[in-house]
Image (cartoon, coloured by chain):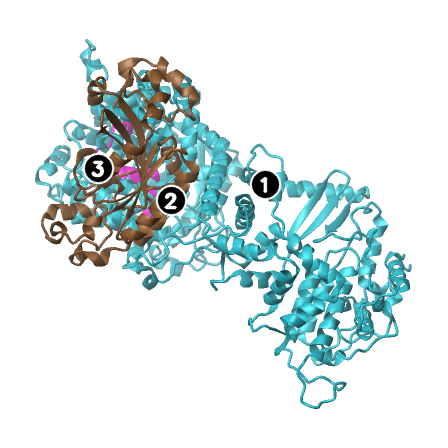
Chain colours: A cyan, B brown
């Protein structure tokens, strides 16, 4: 049942670049356009240059040989706007304008243009011009007044203007006939560079044939029809105005099919369900006709759809509400989803086709909600509307399987489908979920929760009295405000009003939701102070929303005041009084609460994960929590592969299939997990450099860990769930001696036949060596070698022999992969050794430690584990740099020391365990078990460092006792042909550098080097042989002493 | 609103009740049946939670249920605490035709028992028994409109299969009842469509709720029925004082 979301790992602050892209509504770089967009141009353009692949603006497949990279660039510029040959039509427009109280200044900022009859309508606007191939964007300095984002392919012509000296100006002729004049005010070389980049980018677009895509695309836009009709014979305007009203009468899908001779006759513009099923609201009341007229004029002069230039007037027009027919297209344009649609022609249909007939959890959930998405709207009582809604939601969930489908998206989709076609709605939904409301609809809904928290904090800041009252009576703001944000008010207030808020939302961004939310509370402030519980709060809000159409000042003597509706008042308060809430406010508030939210979500899912465990086994809830923490950290560090969906055939079996895929981790993640829990699964280096002492932890890799992974994977899925981990740990952490031995045996008995093969015995020894790799002293190493020799000796001795065979004869030959040793023998071998015995008795279980994940140690502002984690991730690089820096200093001043922390750490150098003297007895060598060993490998090796692995059978001629501290120099010994297995073992052993003797007396630099050579010296082969001859484990007192001395001996210089 | 008038003659106790359960088991339908005695497509899709109120008479007392009907989709799970905190009662709903919904119900019960108000009264309701009871009602293809309405929340395909009702049942009554008993829950099988068992849930909950305790905890404000009576006073000691200071009629808003 438990799913552990990795979503939140990516829940970070957007970077400056990202914010800029967001501001300009640029398509994400991860969205390469499909090949379909490229016409024959792309094939021809061999020398075409490289499309912007890594400039961040947009990833493009490179079309030609690598030429100049398309770079993005910004430059200071002053923008002016002229309309070529349109003087007349412009002059006529002011007549409709006074109502808006905004007369655009026509004071020309005229450069010495070559072209005559260019009429400058825009004042010169200082700002920044950005080239983000394939887009050109501009924003005025205040970021508000003027901005545009236009695809380069809509630029028809660029001219360098022949202007006064010192002025560097470009004139860009855009598809819709506008002439954008930009005066580049940066230094000359910068301007030159910008121009050349622009030229390159334009060339690439041309080669890709993008210019040709513009015309057919623009036909899908209603604004074209609008403008065409307006410029066509007189009556077009008339017809347009009436069009909205009249079509509701007949409800026909085909609205004014253009004036008979109008150039728009071939227009195939896309529209929503509203065209057929009527748009909500009364068109007269909404003053559709005059709004349409105003927009027609604006769009004619300032560009439209792909080339819309946004001047303040645009925002004002939006604030009074978009006309229904234009609404869908304007939403597209304002949100930037139009660029996605432009760049990805046919993708929507393709997604649907590719996934046709597929069902999964998302599609099931969508199915349940189809009939409760704006059910009062007539289209959604018909199959036509329902199936459109189904297709859009499904297409989104197929495209974004991680988000899939979230309730509330149905309402959004249903709402926007009234105004736009399925394809448009699909891309708009993408932009909403992905960019405008990031994380709102994700499985953890972290975006929603964060913004609720931000909203609460804004209420606290802006409306402290209300906030205090809410706290006092314990009313939670979110019970009412959550749906506001989640469904953009569509669900809360009458649709006509919600859509007007949405207009503003697309135009001005997500801050609108906060502004409106605050305004709602402020307007109802008096009443809110009376409420005593959640219920009353909800009721009050409901009443208020129902009364939005009423007069805000019903008792006023001034008829004009009486005419102001509550909704108008709401917008006024929102955008006047709460204009202080800016994008930056929201950003910084989000930054403040991000980790808090992440922490609370995670602790919530942690609680449920633990609650939902089938069994806690023998762990307490706290311990399970620690296991969870380790697991969670592992997932953060090494995210498990995305859950691959089973084939559709498996998914269609309802009810049987798991409702929710459980989070399971793969081997890589498991290694990280185990390194958190288990001391030998990590390498911990204690570094001190005079400034700080820190522990550098590395995840170890070894076959043993992999083996453990598959051992715990009891359901053979190749992945482990939280429950698997809990059960697995339970199997090892509570064991006594016998259980541990058995567990270890089973772990290595791959085929579970109750026997280890010879190979497995060797692997097992390697496992032990791996566990002991950082132990201080030689005790464990000795133990392992004794184990090996014992194992083969007993193993051989206990082999069934042919009747009457000479017991002293060589044991029968057993293939290395044949059953060789059973548990009883194994147990005997282990128990024959004191060190191993004590290891299995307590130490082994103790290497598994449930401790708070070390990240908690990191000081940070947030107390929680996750806060720490986030802190960590945020500053990881910094810390690494700092560490490296201090290390360098430490090295220079000779204070840099590194020690590896042992996994068991039972013995320190001072109390070195009694090594068994027999090992050191030089006289005894060549054991009977040699036969069995040599059956695996006959290769003699010299005393190389590799020989320390204890798995190399043939002894060297030197004595083990010789303590050769300088053997490191002898490592040059050739590796004569060895079976690959031994190679591996040798290599593994070579890796097992054992650095320190003891952490305690680590102050002495010399020690360290001594130890290292000591390690090299460990001539285990001798020990093996010695032991094999010694048979019994008895050590004489003298031998013990000798060993002790040797261990502490100074190396020969 | 209407409540204010009737409340003045009788003691009205406010009870916060939350509905939980897997998506589309019929939570909203149960509430709708209880509140307005109708069965129809959802006018209000549940985003976060829908809020409704209904009064319920029990002997000489009137209970005013404040019902939070939560969204069932899994990802809304983390929002649920916001709704069940301070709740005195919970109805955990599952769908008798869907075994997995009982599993989900069990996890809800677990969560409530550990995280919610310790005195919370929990009822387990197996909904949609109209689909499995071979009554003449559901066998007859009677009201076409209702069938269509049913689609709103019904698992796709079940209406078509309603010819053989018993085969649809996936959760035997005994099994669920045994679980309810073991976990100390009230148990009902209901049909929001026919109305069977719906009112009983709320009456039984009303009987089990420690009304006197609630009243005692809100005595300070007892003169003003409806004004936030139903907060479990035990945990929220500080709140009562505030409530008694709040003033009269305006505060009552329902």
| Gap in angstroms between the C-alphas marked 3 and 2 | 22 Å
Whether labels 1 and 3 share one chain = no
- Residue A244 in the image: state x and y as whole percent: 15, 35
Q: Between tags 1 and 3, which lies in front?
A: 3
Q: Is residue A338 magenta?
A: yes
- Residue A792 in the image: state x and y as whole percent: 71, 75
Which chain is indicated by disc 3? B
| Gap in angstroms between the C-alphas marked 1 and 3 | 54 Å
| Local secondary structure at mark 2 | helix
Query: Badge 1: how crowded within 10 Å, few (<14), some, or many (20+)?
Result: some
Q: Which residue is mark 3?
A: B199
Query: In the displayed structure, does residue A193 sit left or right of residue A270?
Result: right
Label 3 vs 2, first from the N-terminus: 2
- Residue A905 in the image: state x and y as whole percent: 73, 52
Query: Badge 2: how crowded within 10 Å, few (<14), some, or many (20+)?
Result: some
Residue for point 74% across, 88% down: A806
| Local secondary structure at mark 1 | helix
Whether residue A542 can be seen here = yes
Q: Between tags 3 and 2, which lies in front?
A: 2
Query: Badge 3: how crowded within 10 Å, few (<14), some, or many (20+)?
Result: some
| Gap in angstroms between the C-alphas marked 2 and 1 | 43 Å
Residue for point 67% across, 88% down: A802
Q: Is residue B61 magenta?
A: no
Q: Which mark is residue A214?
A: none
- Magenta stretch bounds: A317-341
């Amino acid at each position: 049942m438990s799913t552990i979301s990795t979503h939140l790992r990516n829940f970070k602050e957007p970077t400056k670049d990202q914010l800029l892209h967001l501001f300009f509504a640029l398509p994400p770089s991860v969205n390469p356009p499909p090949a379909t967009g490229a016409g024959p141009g792309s094939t021809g353009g061999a020398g075409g240059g490289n499309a912007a692949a890594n400039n961040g603006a947009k990833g493009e497949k490179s079309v030609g040989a690598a030429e100049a990279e398309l770079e993005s660039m910004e430059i200071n510029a002053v923008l002016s706007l002229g309309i070529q040959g349109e003087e007349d039509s412009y002059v006529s427009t002011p007549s409709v304008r006074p109502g808006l109280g905004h007369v655009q200044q026509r004071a020309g900022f005229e450069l010495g243009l070559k072209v005559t009859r260019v009429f400058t309508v825009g004042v010169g606007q200082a700002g920044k011009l950005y080239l983000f191939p394939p887009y050109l964007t501009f924003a005025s300095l205040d970021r508000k007044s003027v901005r545009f984002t236009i695809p380069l392919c809509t630029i028809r012509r660029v001219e360098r203007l022949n202007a006064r000296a010192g002025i560097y100006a470009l004139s860009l002729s855009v598809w819709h006939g506008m002439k954008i004049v930009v005066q580049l005010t940066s230094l000359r070389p910068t301007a030159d560079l910008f121009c050349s980049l622009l030229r390159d980018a334009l060339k690439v677009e041309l080669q890709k044939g993008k210019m040709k895509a513009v015309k057919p695309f623009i036909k899908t836009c209603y604004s074209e029809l609008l403008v065409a009709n307006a410029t066509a014979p007189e009556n077009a305007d008339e017809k347009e105005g009436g069009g909205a009203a009249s079509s509701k009468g007949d409800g026909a899908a085909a609205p004014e099919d253009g004036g008979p001779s109008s150039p728009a006759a071939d227009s195939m513009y896309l529209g929503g369900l509203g065209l057929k099923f009527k748009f909500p609201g009364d068109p007269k009341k909404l003053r559709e006709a005059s709004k349409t007229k105003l927009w027609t004029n604006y769009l004619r002069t300032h560009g439209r759809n792909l080339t819309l230039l946004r001047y303040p007037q645009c925002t004002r027009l939006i604030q009074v509400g978009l006309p229904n027919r234009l609404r869908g297209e304007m939403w597209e344009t304002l949100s930037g989803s139009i660029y996605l649609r432009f760049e990805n022609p046919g993708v929507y249909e393709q997604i649907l086709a590719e996934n046709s007939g597929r069902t999964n959890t998302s599609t099931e959930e969508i199915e349940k909600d189809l009939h409760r998405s704006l059910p009062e709207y007539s289209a959604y009582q018909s199959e036509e509307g329902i199936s459109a809604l189904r297709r859009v939601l499904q297409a989104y969930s197929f495209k974004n399987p991680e988000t899939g489908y979230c309730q509330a998206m149905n309402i959004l989709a249903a709402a926007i489908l009234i105004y736009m076609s399925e394809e448009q709605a699909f891309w708009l939904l993408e932009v909403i979920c992905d960019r405008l409301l990031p994380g709102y609809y994700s499985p953890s809904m972290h975006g929603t929760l964060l913004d609720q928290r931000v909203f609460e904090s804004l209420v606290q800041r802006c409306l402290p009295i209300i906030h205090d009252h809410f706290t006092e009576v314990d009313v939670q703001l979110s019970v009412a405000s959550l749906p506001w944000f989640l469904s953009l008010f569509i669900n809360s207030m009458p649709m006509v009003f919600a859509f007007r808020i949405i207009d503003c939302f697309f135009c001005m961004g997500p801050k609108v939701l906060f502004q409106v939310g605050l305004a709602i509370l402020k307007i109802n402030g008096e009443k809110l102070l009376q409420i005593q519980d959640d219920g009353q709060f909800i009721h009050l809000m409901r009443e208020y929303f129902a009364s939005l159409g009423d007069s805000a000042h019903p008792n006023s003597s001034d008829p004009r005041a009486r005419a102001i509706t509550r909704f108008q008042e709401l917008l006024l308060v929102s955008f006047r009084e709460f204009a202080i809430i800016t994008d930056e406010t929201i950003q910084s508030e989000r930054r403040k609460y991000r980790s808090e939210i992440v922490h609370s979500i995670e602790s919530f899912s942690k609680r449920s994960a633990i609650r939902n465990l089938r069994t806690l086994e023998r762990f307490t809830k706290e311990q399970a929590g620690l296991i969870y923490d380790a697991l969670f950290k592992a997932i953060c560090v090494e995210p498990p592969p995305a859950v691959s969906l089973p084939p559709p055939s498996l998914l269609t079996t309802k009810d049987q299939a798991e409702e929710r895929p459980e989070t399971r981790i793969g081997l890589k993640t498991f290694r990280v997990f185990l390194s958190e829990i288990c001391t030998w699964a990590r390498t911990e280096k204690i570094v001190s450099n005079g400034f700080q002492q820190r522990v550098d932890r590395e995840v170890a890799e070894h076959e043993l860990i992999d083996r453990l992974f598959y051992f715990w994977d009891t359901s053979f899925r190749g992945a482990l769930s939280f429950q698997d981990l809990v059960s697995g740990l339970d199997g090892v952490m509570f064991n006594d001696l016998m259980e541990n031995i058995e567990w270890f045996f089973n772990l290595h008995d791959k085929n579970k036949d109750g026997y280890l093969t010879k190979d497995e015995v060797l692997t097992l020894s390697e496992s032990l060596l791996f566990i002991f790799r950082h132990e201080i002293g030689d005790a464990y190493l000795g133990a392992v070698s004794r184990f090996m020799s014992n194992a083969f000796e007993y193993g051989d001795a206990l082999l069934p022999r042919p009747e009457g065979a000479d017991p002293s004869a060589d044991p029968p030959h057993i293939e290395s992969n044949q059953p060789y040793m059973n548990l009883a023998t194994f147990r005997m071998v282990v128990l024959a050794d004191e060190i191993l015995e004590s290891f299995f008795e307590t130490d082994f279980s103790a290497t598994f430690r449930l401790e708070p994940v070390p990240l908690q140690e990191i000081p940070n502002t947030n107390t929680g584990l996750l806060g720490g984690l986030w802190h960590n991730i945020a500053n990881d690089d910094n810390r690494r740099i700092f560490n490296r820096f201090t290390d360098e200093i430490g090295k220079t001043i000779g204070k840099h020391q590194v020690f590896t922390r042992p996994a068991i750490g039972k013995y320190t150098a001072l109390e070195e365990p009694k090594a068994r003297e027999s090992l050191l007895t030089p006289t005894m060598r060549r054991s009977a078990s040699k036969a069995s060993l040599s059956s695996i490998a006959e290769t003699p090796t010299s005393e190389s460092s590799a020989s320390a692995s204890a798995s190399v059978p043939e002894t060297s001629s030197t004595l083990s006792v010789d303590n050769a501290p300088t053997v490191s120099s002898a490592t040059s010994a050739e590796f004569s042909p060895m079976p690959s297995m031994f190679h591996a073992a040798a290599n593994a052993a070579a890796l097992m550098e054992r650095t320190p003797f003891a952490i305690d007396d680590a102050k002495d630099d010399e020690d360290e080097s001594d130890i290292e050579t000591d390690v090299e010296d460990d001539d285990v082969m001798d020990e093996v042989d010695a032991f094999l001859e010694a048979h019994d484990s008895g050590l004489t007192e003298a031998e013990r002493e000798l060993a002790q001395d040797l261990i502490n001996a100074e190396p020969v210089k | 609103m209407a409540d204010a008038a009737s409340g003045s003659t009788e003691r009205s106790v406010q009870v916060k009740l939350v509905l939980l359960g897997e998506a589309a088991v019929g939570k909203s339908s149960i509430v709708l049946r209880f509140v307005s005695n109708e069965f129809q497509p959802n006018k209000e899709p549940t985003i976060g939670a829908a809020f409704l109120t209904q009064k319920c008479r029990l002997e000489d007392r009137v209970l005013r249920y404040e019902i939070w009907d939560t969204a069932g989709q899994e990802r809304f799970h983390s929002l649920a605490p916001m709704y069940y905190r301070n709740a005195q009662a919970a109805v955990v709903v599952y769908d008798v035709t869907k075994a997995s919904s009982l599993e989900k119900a069990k996890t809800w019960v677990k969560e409530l028992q550990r995280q919610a108000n310790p005195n919370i009264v929990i009822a387990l309701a197996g909904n949609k028994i109209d689909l499995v009871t071979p009554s003449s009602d559901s066998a007859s293809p009677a009201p076409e409109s209702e069938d269509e309405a049913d689609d709103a929340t019904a698992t796709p395909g079940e209406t078509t299969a309603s010819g053989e009702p018993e085969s649809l049942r996936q959760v035997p009554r005994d099994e669920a009842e045994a679980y309810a008993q073991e976990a100390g829950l009230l148990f009902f099988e209901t049909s929001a469509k026919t109305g069977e068992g719906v009112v009983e849930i709320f009456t039984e909950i009303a009987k089990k709720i420690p009304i006197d305790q609630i009243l005692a905890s809100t005595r300070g404000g007892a003169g003003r029925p409806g004004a936030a009576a139903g907060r479990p006073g035990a945990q929220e000691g500080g709140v009562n004082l505030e409530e008694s200071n709040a003033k009269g009629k305006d505060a009552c808003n329902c």
